[in-house]
Image (spheres, grey):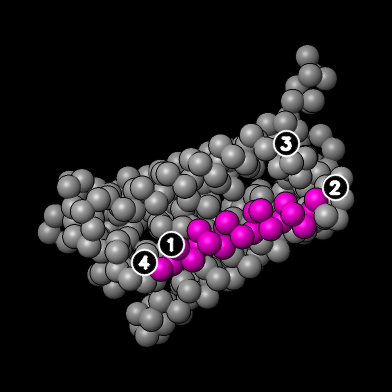
Amino acid sequence: MASDSSTFSTSPILAFAATAVVTGLWFSALLAIPGLQDSGLSVVVARIGVHLVEISGTWAALSLAPLTRAQKIRTWLALAAPLTLWHGAAWAIVANGLLLPGATAIPLLPLMIVVPTAIVIVLLLRSRRIATVLDAMPAHWLVGLQAYRVIGAVFLANWAVGTTPGIFALPAGTGDVITGLMALPTAVVLAGGRQGSIRSALFWNLFGIADLVVAVTLGALTTPGPLQQLALDHPNLTTGTYPTAIIPAFTVPTSLVLHALSLRQLARRARPAATVAA
């Protein structure tokens, strides 16, 4: 398999180590400085930072596509504007406490995860313009971007201080951290076009999706409401509390979208190799 247009000189081990060190320092700060965790400042800063990277990365991807400048601008606005509105709406819902148990008569969080995610994935995967962009951009970008998934360590921090039940926090937080820690190493391997790199990236995507499904399922089963079956004596309030609730309300859906786009991109790039092998 040919390597992407730009490759890393970094080794996968170094990429993993760097991500692990940063994550470890951040997690240690959450535990050592209670006010940092209580304020939710780290989640707010991380979520805003990721959003800025996503919309700027969208323009970087468009810059590589064989489109006119006007087409690139229109496409960027068609992607960045709805994404920003989606983010803002989710933020407003979380900030106003609408995801807290009993705040609404309908299961708002599951709807916020399933409905917009399904609509966005269908629209993006059916778009020829998006297909052109995905074919032009390096495949490792969509993988490496999800290093932000280490933000799920906040669930582990909440469990450590006793505010979140372990039956939710341990699987959800650990899965997120593993996904985030392996994002850059997987991207490095993919960028270098190493043997089996597409297979590794496919496995990473499937693991990341499984982690999100497990987290959402356990969140529903441990949060007070009609679906609660677990943690009855120590319910999970994390998924409805500002600002941590922005993770299931927006980060989970957009992460699923990124996984879907990455899988589409990898599948198309694996096809020529499979044809040659046949």
Rendered location of residue 270, percent (x, y): 73, 30
In-image side of 125 versus 38 (left or right): right
- Which corner quadrant of the image does residue 196 belong to? top right
The reply to whether dot 2 and dot 4 touch (C-beta < 8 Å) is: no
Mark 1 residue element: helix
Cα–Cα gap, marks 3 and 4: 34 Å
Which amino acid is tagged 4? Val
Whichever of callouts 2 and 3 sits on the residue coming sooner in the sequence is 2
Residue plotted at (17% across, 47% down): 226
Cα–Cα gap, marks 3 and 1: 28 Å
Whichever of callouts 3 and 1 sits on the residue coming sooner in the sequence is 1
Report the front residue among 268 and 183.
268
Q: Which residues are magenta?
A: 71-92
Name the residue beneath numbered marker 1: 90
Mark 3 residue element: helix
Name the residue beneath numbered marker 2: 67
The majority secondary structure of the magenta stretch comes to helix
Which amino acid is tagged 2? Leu
